[in-house]
Image (cartoon, rainbow, N blue to C red):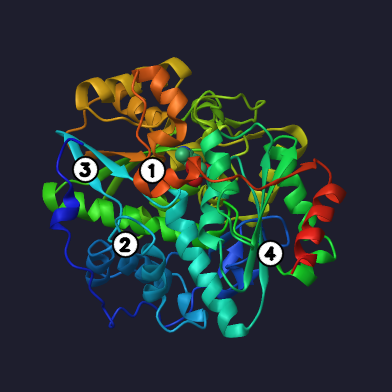
């Protein structure tokens, strides 16, 4: 590794018992105007009843002292403060920070993800050292701990259902394996995930995990998970949603944007740009929340692979999904960027009916158009850039040859954007590393000639036996498999 790891100068984690954000409890409303609920009520919910996503009814106000506490300290402390700001007091949990800290024990760097300076003005945020080597761990490990704690208090059982194109399934299996009151069922597309990703889901050897290889694509998996929620079994088994639109997952991710911008700002005195490899728009939306609350953040830069639905929106004002194409960065092979609906709600001035109309139009005509005012509101905080397969290969080569650092093909889309951008002397720029290169070793080796080393804590995978069931892409086949799994006790 090159550069200086700021972790060495990280202050020891501190508790701030006085962190006392709200006199009232923040509520969440649907982006389409329906339901208003508290955090405890939405923590295991997918979409709202009207099909919308839950968003905070307003941004919590943060004073200068609180902002200092949000941008300093370890990951668990900051995550605890973020959750409190956003209504965690509605949860029957004494100390949410302790629960997050417990989850972080499974990380090689429990204090938080490493922030490294690569060269003048360029930094990386290494989100890929968690148990399953992708940033999803930062949300799913603490979320699993919180849900397990809640179920323990209530003496209840639940079953987590997850459709995955790889990384979310791996993080879910790791986070929920061997938990007493919980079972996890993951559905992945047969042949649609890397060997490494599949093994992360199939070699865990935990009684409470069922891995299903589905003879269909990711959309089929996602469709069946949605259908399973509508079945009678949903109540009996207590199906729970921890998918990528879960608001608590996003809030947990907000913590590393506060921490990283705070660390860099305290060294440089400058605000920070984040370049984020984007699929479902969850990770970059977390950065946007940190910015709204006052973190020293300047621009947010979305990057995409050939599935460039968001860069096209920025260029044309038109949201329109094409057919998904397979790339070397499969976790970004997405055309329906679900969490963008949350941003749409902000740029349409919290108008649920207008969001509903746009989403309806996207569903029936595969299209909505943003007005000039909406586009300028979008561009106040965001820009977007695409990265072709050959751009990504060049970016991996550049990082290896110039900075002696192997990066994954998702991260490569962000490095490509950095190389395209004009040098910005008024801000520091952070490339967000979303996965470990070892997870995508074929693509990395083909670009750089170097086979990335698998970190010791993840190397067990390649030896253990795989356990999974193969099912047809229909609900009966999946249901039969799940019933058999539950009957086993
Ligand atoms: C999930 C994922 C992304 C996309 O993140 P979103 O929050 O869906 O935008 C990017 N890179 C990797 C490696 C991922 O696993």
Q: Secondary structure at mark 2?
A: helix
Dots 1, 3 in contact, CB < 8 A: no
- Earlier in the chain: of badge 4 and badge 2, it is 4
> How many other residues sit within 10 Å of disc 1, few (<14), some (14-19) or many (≥20)?
some
Q: Which mark is residue 381?
A: 1
- Earlier in the chain: of badge 4 and badge 1, it is 4
3D distance between C-alphas at marks 4 and 2: 33 Å
Residue 382 to residue 479: above or below: above
3D distance between C-alphas at marks 4 and 3: 43 Å
3D distance between C-alphas at marks 3 and 2: 16 Å
Front-most of residues 124 and 202: 202
Q: Secondary structure at mark 1?
A: helix
Q: Indicate left or right for 380 with 211 as reference.
A: left
Residue 112 to residue 1: above or below: below
Mark 4 vs mark 3, foreground winner is 3
Q: Which residue is mark 2?
A: 75
Residue 16: % across, % down:
26, 78
> How many other residues sit within 10 Å of disc 3, few (<14), some (14-19) or many (≥20)?
many
Q: Is residue 200 visible to us here? A: yes
Q: Which residue is mark 3?
A: 116
- Earlier in the chain: of badge 2 and badge 1, it is 2
- Quarter holding residue 424: top left
Dots 4, 3 in contact, CB < 8 A: no
3D distance between C-alphas at marks 4 and 1: 27 Å
- Earlier in the chain: of badge 1 and badge 3, it is 3
């Amino acid at each position: 590794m090159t550069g200086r790891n700021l972790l060495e100068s990280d202050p020891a984690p501190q508790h701030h018992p006085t962190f006392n954000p709200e006199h009232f409890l923040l509520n969440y409303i649907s982006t389409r105007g329906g339901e208003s609920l508290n955090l405890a009520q939405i923590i295991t919910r997918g979409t709202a009843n009207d099909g919308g996503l839950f968003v905070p009814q307003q941004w919590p106000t943060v004073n200068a002292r609180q902002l200092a506490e949000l941008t300093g300290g370890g990951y668990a402390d900051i995550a605890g403060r973020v959750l409190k700001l956003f209504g965690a007091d509605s949860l029957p949990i004494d100390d949410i920070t302790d629960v997050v800290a417990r989850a972080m024990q499974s990380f090689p760097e429990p204090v938080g993800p490493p922030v490294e300076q690569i060269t003048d003005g360029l930094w990386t945020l290494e989100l890929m050292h968690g148990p399953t080597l992708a940033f999803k761990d930062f949300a799913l490990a603490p979320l699993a701990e919180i849900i397990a704690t809640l179920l323990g208090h209530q003496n209840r059982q639940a079953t987590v259902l997850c459709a995955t194109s790889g990384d979310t399934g791996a993080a879910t299996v790791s986070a929920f394996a061997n938990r007493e009151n919980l079972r996890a069922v993951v559905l992945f597309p047969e042949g649609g995930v890397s060997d490494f990703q599949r093994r992360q889901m199939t070699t865990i050897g935990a009684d409470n995990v069922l891995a299903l290889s589905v003879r269909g694509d990711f959309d089929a998996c996602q469709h069946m998970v949605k259908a399973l929620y509508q079945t009678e079994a949903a109540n009996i088994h207590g199906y729970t949603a921890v998918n990528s639109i879960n608001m608590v997952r996003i809030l947990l991710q907000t913590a590393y944007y506060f921490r990283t911008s705070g660390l860099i700002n305290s060294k440089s005195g400058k605000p920070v740009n984040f370049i984020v490899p984007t699929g479902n728009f969850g990770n970059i939306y977390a950065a946007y929340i940190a910015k709204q609350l006052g973190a020293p953040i300047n621009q947010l830069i979305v990057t995409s692979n050939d599935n460039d639905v968001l860069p096209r929106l920025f260029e044309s004002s038109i949201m329109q999904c094409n057919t998904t194409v397979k790339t070397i960065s499969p976790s970004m092979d997405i055309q329906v960027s679900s969490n963008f609906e949350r941003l749409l709600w902000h740029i349409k001035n919290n108008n649920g009916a207008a969001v509903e109309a746009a989403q309806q139009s996207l569903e029936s005509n595969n299209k909505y158009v943003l007005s000039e005012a909406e586009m300028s509101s979008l561009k106040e905080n965001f820009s977007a850039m695409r990265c072709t397969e050959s751009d990504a290969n060049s970016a991996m080569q550049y990082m290896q040859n110039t900075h002696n650092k192997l990066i994954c093909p998702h991260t490569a889309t962000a490095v490509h954007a950095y190389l395209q951008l004009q040098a910005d002397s008024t801000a520091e720029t952070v490339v967000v590393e979303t996965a470990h290169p070892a997870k995508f070793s074929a693509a990395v080796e083909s670009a750089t000639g170097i086979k990335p080393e698998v970190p010791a804590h993840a190397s067990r995978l390649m030896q253990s036996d795989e356990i999974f069931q193969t099912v047809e892409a229909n609900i009966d086949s999946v249901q039969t498999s799940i019933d058999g799994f539950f009957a086993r006790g």
